[in-house]
Amino acid sequence: MKLKHIALAAMLAATGVANAAIDTGADSNGDFFFSIWDSAKSYTRDLNIQTTSFYTDVAAPGSYKYEFDLASDAVFAGFISTANLSELKWNISMVETQGAKTVIDTYSTLPAARITNDLGRTMAAGTGAFATAVNNGMTAQGTTDSAVFASATPGYANNAIGSIPFGDSHGLLLNFKNTGTVANNSYVAGLGLVKMDFATQGILPGVYTPIVDPSNASAVRAYMEGDYNLVITAVPEPESYAMLLAGLGLMGAIARRRQNKA
């Protein structure tokens, strides 16, 4: 049931039937969006995954999985055809700007320290402003769910300096790396997703909560396969299971050897 729902979400994203703008969560129900860039231009797409449905789908029985074929989008195809592949960086974000601020981001490694609530609120405001710039760009470019921006324009995803901090670590407001590369092309090499909550006032540290699927206790991760198929899932590939079983077998052998010596 859950996988059918995710497949429908991907179909709606592909056809533009779903909402045609990134929701910045003024109603506490923001949209996930994907951005990828080199030094000259960027591409951003509304994934049409709202936070309420995302939390419900992750918590439901069965392992969570969402896929979208970026190459099926003509806007992405135009972007990637001239992109500098060695420079490419990408991330997935979501922002809720109503009341207490919430930002969801991809990550490679989370630090023990968390940024303060005031920095988090600034980061959330910048993320919302970036999403608004993307929405304006989609309208201007006559598209519905995605758009491409030159590096000198507000919708450029690595606009780390200025009024719309985004890109690498949200203009360095964030204290961990939130971007991936084309090397993040499998579940094992993928990026995790973390929910960050920031209070409406004060300077205490915010709350970081890595997103895990309770059905299999696996982290929800995002990766981009070699054919530009974007995947967000808590389902390790078969080879990942094989590596896990091999590791468990080795640990069992070591334990038996120690027991025999004893």
Image (spheres, rainbow, N blue to C red):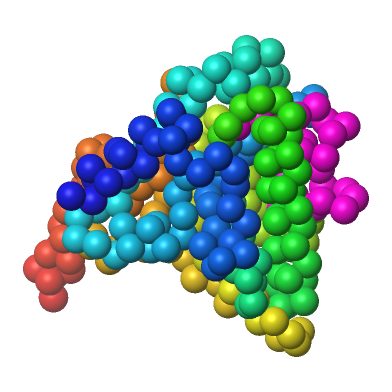
Q: Is residue 124 visible?
A: yes
Q: Position of residue 125 (x, y in %)?
A: 75, 62
Q: Nearer the viewer, residue 40 or 109?
A: 40
In the displayed structure, 4 sits above or below 128; it is above
For the image shown, how many numbered marks are present on the structure? 0
Q: Is residue 87 visible?
A: no
- The boundaries of the magenta stretch are 146-170
Q: Position of residue 176 (x, y in %)?
A: 66, 59
Q: Is 45 situated left or right of 205 in this image?
A: left
Residue that lies at the very extreme toward the top in this rendered image: 81
Q: Position of residue 161 (x, y in %)?
A: 88, 48
Q: Nearer the viewer, residue 193 or 134?
A: 134
Which of the image's four quarters has the C terminus?
bottom left
Q: Position of residue 164 (x, y in %)?
A: 82, 51
Residue drawn at x 58%, y 53% is 23
Q: Is 256 situated left or right of 88 in this image?
A: left
Which image quadrant for residue 25? bottom right
